[in-house]
Image (spheres, rainbow, N blue to C red):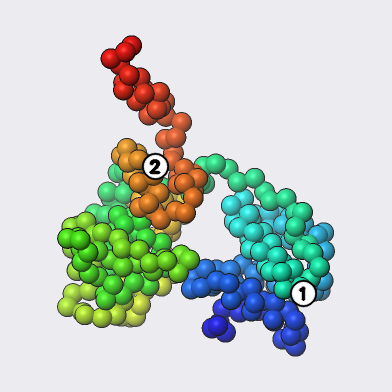
Amino acid sequence: MDTHTLPALLNADDPMLRLALAAHLARYKGQSRAHTASDLNVYLRWCLERDVMPLQAKRAHVELYLRWLQEIRHLRPSTVSRRLSVLAAFYRTCVIDQILDHSPAEFVRRPHVPLESPTLGLSHLQFEAILTAGRDSANRNDFALVAMLGLLGLRVFEATGTDVQALGEARGHRVLRVHGKGDKTALVPLPPAVGRAIDRAIEDRAAGPILLDRRGQRMDRHAATRRLKALARSANVTTARMHPHVLRHTFVTTMLDAGVDLRDVQVAARHADPRTTMRYDRARNNLDRHPNYILAAFMASAT
């Protein structure tokens, strides 16, 4: 296991805690491991500041940690729920490995997560403006960045982590091989506009990252966020928080607004659970799309 994915420890001389963390993180790969380690780090730092030993924590400590996330850090319910899930999974592994007799997180109630995602996707006109700004930008990576996030629906780590060698063809389509969450690989077809944007970014390079920063190095999520904020300013697009996930959200909401079937959108977004896709559907309560009308039209000859 890469040592950089191990969370910060309260006591470097605590072999049991180190073993428990390593055993739990060994269950994950790639970005899932890194994100799990990051969430565990938050809890370990919280414990350090309060002289709490993680392997001796009680349910009350986990409850206090939950309240701290909600009332001091003011995190969104979905973020709080995710971090509690990560912590519960860690303690469950400790029970499986007989490090603990029971999990202190077992009976902690998770916060209610609203059905609709709090992240607002761009409107159709705002999305067009961002695409135009990227296409007209002097930085040849901008259009590829916007296209990969907004027209392919890639997560930011997928877009920035993809190399030129991932381009290819499959069943008559030009495709991009994407290494996604859960160490899963997907073949994503490239519409012509996205293909042109990527070709513009890579020029005549045959290897290396598709997206580069201003120093010619692989673009990271921080550089991607800065470029998107700059494009939003140049396009006069105002949004509370402009970040890469806004474009992935826009990818899903625009598909749903265009009438693409929910199942097809789920497949395109590579969501494991259709409920995740439904959270993005801002028109879910639009009665114009109610399935009763489709059924009535189908049975019109009998009615």
Of 101 and 142, the residue lying toward us: 101
Please state, as top left, top right, bottom left or bottom right, where the N terminus lies in the image. bottom right
Q: Is residue 66 above or below residue 288?
A: below
Q: Which residue is mark 1?
A: 99
Q: What residue occupies the far top of the structure in this picture? A: 303
Q: What residue occupies the far front of the structure in this picture? A: 302
Q: Earlier in the sequence, mark 1 or mark 2?
A: 1
Residue 172, image quadrant: bottom left
Residue drawn at point x = 82 percent, y = 64 percent = 58
Disc 1 vs disc 2: which is toward the camera? 1
Looking at the rendered structure, the kind of residue marked 1 is: Ile
Q: Which residue is mark 2?
A: 262
Q: Position of residue 233 (x, y in %)?
A: 35, 56
For mark 1, give the secondary structure. loop
Looking at the rendered structure, the kind of residue marked 2 is: Leu
Q: Position of residue 153 (x, y in %)?
A: 36, 56
Residue drawn at point x = 35 percent, y = 63 percent = 186
Residue 253, image quadrant: top left
Please state, as top left, top right, bottom left or bottom right, where the C terminus lies in the image. top left
Q: What residue occupies the far bottom of the structure in this picture? A: 13
Of 240 and 31, the residue lying toward us: 31
Of 228 and 91, the residue lying toward us: 91
Q: Is residue 272 above or below residue 257?
A: below
Distance from Cα at disc 1 to Cα at disc 2: 43 Å
The reply to whether residue 138 is in sight is no
Please tell me how many numbered marks the rendered image carries.
Answer: 2
For mark 2, give the secondary structure. helix
Q: Position of residue 131 (x, y in %)?
A: 27, 54
Residue 97, image quadrant: bottom right
Q: Position of residue 208 (x, y in %)?
A: 29, 80
Q: Is residue 134 above or below residue 20?
A: above
The reply to whether residue 294 is in sight is yes
